[in-house]
Image: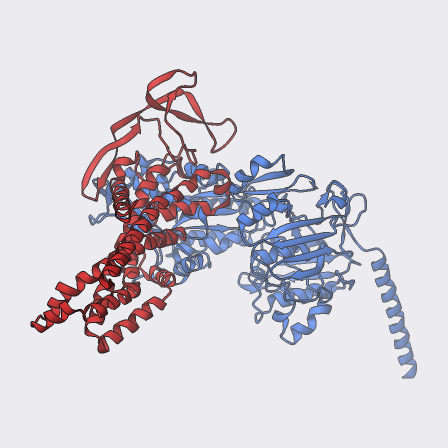
């Protein structure tokens, strides 16, 4: 498979992942905050075609859960209660992108039945639904932070490379300073200084902004390097000779030159920032309850009893793997493309 | 003149000889205490996980629980509260009498007993110890316990084995004050105390030869960060019904294990043989392997811990407009009652404590068997009734959102300690329950000390989920929480209650119970305190967890208790049923 196909496949997969989390309300059978207090720590369940007596059913169904005799938080399937899986059925209301309010779900079961594909947490919340909703924070925090970081980096790098002199020196020392700041500690400090009244989601967005704006050092240095070499090229010198203004030169000739390196940086940084969000939420510094993120879903596994008794609480940890792999594949493909382009130019 | 001198010399000599004889006689027949527990087998060692590490071996400045857990096994008090029965029993004091006015207390000490280094124990050690604890300059944590009506108790030696304690005012349950106040060896600490170096004495690095106590175990070896090894005190003053000297165990080892979860793993691997307290989840996680790994799990029932939802009712918040705006709701009784009614405590018991907890009506938990007022019940969970209450208080709804009398949405932040998963879970359940009332509550988890700083000092918070625990089955420790000037009167610190208000009545009732010697009358006063707390809800009481623990099945005389040190309180009586070589 060549680099182009890899890039395309990774891109399509990423689009699909992002689409699923944006439409989490549709794909998830329940709201992320819906608690089934009678079924905490319910294990994952699957759809059946054969019932307890071995009889085949054309339409998939799930069994109800009943408490095991004399135990707490342990269940067995109730062969007397079967709930057929309903597709495109009505359920909890949800909003797509905060705008369209809908109540149709890809699949669900009729009350009092429940469908918990990845089991439930200690509050009886559906882990599958929470994993889908959790992606909204994790993926978009990564995208947003990386977008800010690369945009600031492009701007600073282009200005520094193009004008040189004191501006270059100042911006590059600033960039080095930003690279030297340990981002995790900075974030801890910012988070603790935010007033309590700030909505958790808003607080997190602010934190993402802060991170994006202090991690621009590395992309800025790369972009500066590209601009430094590009501004000496013949076509740039020719344009300058014909009286092109600095703004025109930057916009028309230099920024397009930096685009490929910026895109590669973006593809490298997004997964880094996704991991960053997961780390923060794992440490309890991300979005607050009840909103899920991949990090805070995984934070339940910090506790010994969860690890030994409820293995399904680890399942949300698998969700970032395909996304991060797709991002890395995309960044590798972009990098290779950039290298080839460089070789062509040199050749 | 010479004759008189000779007579005096003879008398002195005679008294010296008599004194030595008397001392020798006392030492020959020490007044040992006979315990009625099952006679055990001598030998073996018991390893217990400890987290975090104790800070020193100096009981004068021991404030934290881990240090106290170790020191209580090494020291003894005058009168001890039996953790199983909750009643006082003789310890270093073999008997005591209270004066009729309840203002003084005379104790008779055991004769002929010795510290762990062999030095004799007498009234001078008791007077010295209490002198140290009451010293204002040292500011020992025990000092607060020994202030009765804000005045320190007086200690007076009446004889070599007799001491009188006097209080400024009558003091109910005076004998309970002596529990867990260790008697110090005057012969080892007097010099340090005189030189003002007591705080530096008995650090973790201290040599075992320089340490002495009256408890069942004495220091053998301390390896900071690793373990503390205690060995049997050969001079201990208790014997069993067969006349065997206690303790039975040769060694008691405290293994430093950094976290609760790690402690569970070490217990499962039999690296440690006793674990308490256990969380309900870890209890459930240990349950399946009980038979295979030969350990027993214990549920001692509701403890002394009470958890509650705290609203900021402080009146010095003028500089915090966001808090002031919300305090209008919090200060309304109907609002607090509605919140209390909308909280599903049974779900909390089930989901957070896996059915090993009890819903609470007040700060008095069912663990306080002698004092709990059974007529004050936790409110019945009813969202409909809660909504009615809010409606009658002038609240309205717009869609799903609750609006206050000004038409503004009711929304506030609940703080919870990030290091306490159980309280965070409670906060999440409350958040979900309040949603049903249309209240948008945000849960913010925060490092515990930062949270405490907001609650106790800056008052920059709206609501918080907190928990407190009493040390004893008696109303007195609750003074700090209930009375308006108490340091744990968290909802409104340094409150100045208006005359005739319910808080003023609470202050009066608590002050009265403190000096009422008759148990029935005292109970009546305390019943009334509970009625007011349950009715006025200065905080919304939630649940009280059970005390859970585990120990190797082969250990004898294990009697789980609901106050510290849960499974180790009678470490002197615990023994291995099978021969010691196995352990």
Residue B402, percent across and down? Answer: 25, 43
Q: Colour of chain B?
A: blue
In the image, B313 versus A104, the foreground residue is A104
| Numbered disc total | 0
Hue of chain A?
A: red
Specify whether B88 is left or right of A242.
right
Furthest residue in direction front, as rendered: A347
Q: Which of the 4 image quarters holds residue B317?
A: bottom left
- Residue B459: give x, y in percent of width and height: 36, 60
Q: Tell which residue pokes out farthest to the left in this image.
A: A242
* In-front residue for pair A198/A206: A206
Residue B276: x and y, percent? 58, 46
**Camera-side residue of A256 and A148:** A256
Task: Give the x, y percent position of residue A113.
Answer: 35, 26
Residue B311 shows in this picture: no
Residue at image x 33%, y 70%? A177
Task: State which quadrant residue B71 falls in.
Answer: bottom right
Q: Which residue is pictured at 40% across the width and 63% down the height?
A: B457
- Residue B524 visible: yes
Residue B427 higher or lower than B14, as above or below: above
B420 and B340: which one is in front?
B420
Q: Is residue B544 left or right of residue B202?
A: left
């Amino acid at each position: 498979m060549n680099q182009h196909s890899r890039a395309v496949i990774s891109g399509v997969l990423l689009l699909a992942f992002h689409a699923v989390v944006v439409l989490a309300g549709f794909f998830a059978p329940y709201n992320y905050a819906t608690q089934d207090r009678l079924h905490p720590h319910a294990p994952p369940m699957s759809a059946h075609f054969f019932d307890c007596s071995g009889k085949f059913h054309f339409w998939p169904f799930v069994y109800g859960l009943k408490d095991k005799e004399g135990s707490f938080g342990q269940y067995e399937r109730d062969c007397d209660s079967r709930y057929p899986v309903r597709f495109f059925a009505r359920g909890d209301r949800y909003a797509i992108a905060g705008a369209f309010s809908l109540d149709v779900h890809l699949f669900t079961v009729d009350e009092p039945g429940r469908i918990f594909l990845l089991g439930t947490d200690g509050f009886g919340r559906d882990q599958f639904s929470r994993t889908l909703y959790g992606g909204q924070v994790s993926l978009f925090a990564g995208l947003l932070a990386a977008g800010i970081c690369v945009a600031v980096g492009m701007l600073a790098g282009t200005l520094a490379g193009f004008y040189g002199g004191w501006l270059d020196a100042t911006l590059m020392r600033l960039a080095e300073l930003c690279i030297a700041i340990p981002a995790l500690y900075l974030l801890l400090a910012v988070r603790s200084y935010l007033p309590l009244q700030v909505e958790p989601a808003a607080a997190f967005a602010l934190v993402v902004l802060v991170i994006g704006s202090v991690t621009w050092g590395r992309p800025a240095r790369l972009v500066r390097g590209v601009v430094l070499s590009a501004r000496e090229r013949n076509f740039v010198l020719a344009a300058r000779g014909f009286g092109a203004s600095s703004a025109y030169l930057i916009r028309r000739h230099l920024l397009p030159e930096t685009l490929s390196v910026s895109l590669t940086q973006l593809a490298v940084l997004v997964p880094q920032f996704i991991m960053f969000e997961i780390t923060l939420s794992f440490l309890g510094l991300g979005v607050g309850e009840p909103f899920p993120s991949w990090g805070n879903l995984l934070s339940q596994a910090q506790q010994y009893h969860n690890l030994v008794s409820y293995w399904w609480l680890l399942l949300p940890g698998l969700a970032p793997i395909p996304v991060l792999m797709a991002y890395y594949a995309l960044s590798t493909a972009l990098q290779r493309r950039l290298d080839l382009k460089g070789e062509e130019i040199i050749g | 003149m010479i004759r008189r001198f000779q007579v005096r010399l003879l008398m002195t000599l005679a008294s010296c000889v008599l004194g030595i004889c008397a001392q020798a006689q006392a030492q020959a027949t020490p007044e040992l205490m006979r315990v009625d527990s099952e006679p055990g087998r001598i030998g073996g060692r018991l390893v217990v996980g400890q987290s975090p590490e104790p800070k020193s071996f100096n009981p004068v400045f021991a404030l934290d629980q881990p240090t106290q857990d170790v020191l209580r096994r090494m020291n003894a008090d005058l009168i001890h509260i039996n953790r199983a029965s909750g009643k006082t029993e003789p310890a270093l004091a073999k008997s005591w009498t209270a004066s009729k006015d309840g203002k003084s207390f005379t104790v008779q000490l055991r004769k002929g007993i010795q510290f762990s280094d062999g030095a004799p124990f007498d009234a001078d050690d008791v007077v010295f110890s209490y002198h140290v604890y009451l010293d204002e300059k040292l500011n020992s944590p025990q000092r607060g316990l020994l202030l009765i009506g804000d005045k320190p108790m007086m200690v007076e030696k009446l004889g070599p084995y007799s001491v009188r304690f006097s209080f400024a005012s009558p003091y109910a349950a005076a004998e309970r004050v002596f529990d867990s106040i260790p008697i110090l060896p005057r012969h080892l600490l007097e010099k340090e105390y005189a030189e003002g170096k007591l705080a530096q004495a008995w650090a973790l690095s201290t040599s075992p030869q320089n340490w002495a106590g009256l408890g069942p175990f004495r220091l053998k070896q301390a390896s900071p960060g690793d373990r503390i090894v205690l060995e049997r005190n050969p001079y201990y003053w208790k014997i069993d019904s067969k006349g065997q000297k206690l303790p039975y165990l040769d060694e008691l080892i405290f293994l430093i294990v950094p976290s609760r979860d790690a402690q569970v793993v070490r217990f499962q691997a039999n690296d440690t043989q006793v674990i308490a307290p256990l969380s309900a989840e870890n209890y459930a996680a240990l349950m399946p392997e009980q038979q295979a790994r030969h350990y027993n799990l214990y549920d001692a029932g509701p403890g002394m811990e009470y958890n509650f939802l705290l609203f900021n009712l402080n009146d010095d918040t003028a500089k915090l407009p966001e808090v002031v705006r919300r305090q209008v709701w919090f200060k309304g009784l109907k609002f607090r009652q509605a919140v209390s009614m909308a909280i599903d405590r049974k779900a909390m018991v089930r989901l957070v404590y896996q059915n090993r907890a009890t819903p609470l009506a007040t700060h008095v938990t069912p663990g306080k068997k002698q004092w709990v007022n059974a007529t004050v019940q936790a409110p019945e969970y009813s969202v409909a009734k809660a909504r009615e209450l809010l409606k009658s208080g002038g609240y309205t709804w717009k869609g799903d959102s609750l609006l206050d009398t000004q038409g503004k949405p009711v929304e506030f932040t609940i703080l919870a300690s990030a290091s306490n998963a159980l309280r965070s879970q409670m906060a999440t359940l409350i958040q979900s329950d309040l949603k049903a009332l249309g209240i948008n509550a945000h849960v913010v988890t925060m490092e515990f000390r930062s949270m405490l700083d907001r609650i106790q000092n800056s008052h920059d918070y709206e609501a918080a989920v907190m928990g407190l625990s009493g040390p004893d089955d008696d109303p007195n420790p609750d003074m700090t929480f209930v009375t308006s000037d108490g340091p744990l009167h968290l909802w409104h610190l340094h409150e100045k209650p208006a005359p005739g208000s319910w808080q003023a009545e609470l202050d009066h009732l608590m002050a009265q119970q403190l000096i009422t010697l008759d148990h029935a009358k005292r109970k009546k006063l305390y019943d009334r305190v509970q009625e007011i707390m349950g009715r006025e809800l200065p905080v919304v009481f939630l649940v009280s967890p059970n005390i859970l623990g585990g120990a190797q099945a082969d250990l004898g005389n294990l009697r789980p208790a609901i106050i510290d040190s849960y499974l180790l309180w009678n470490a002197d009586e615990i023994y291995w049923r099978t021969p010691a070589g196995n352990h």
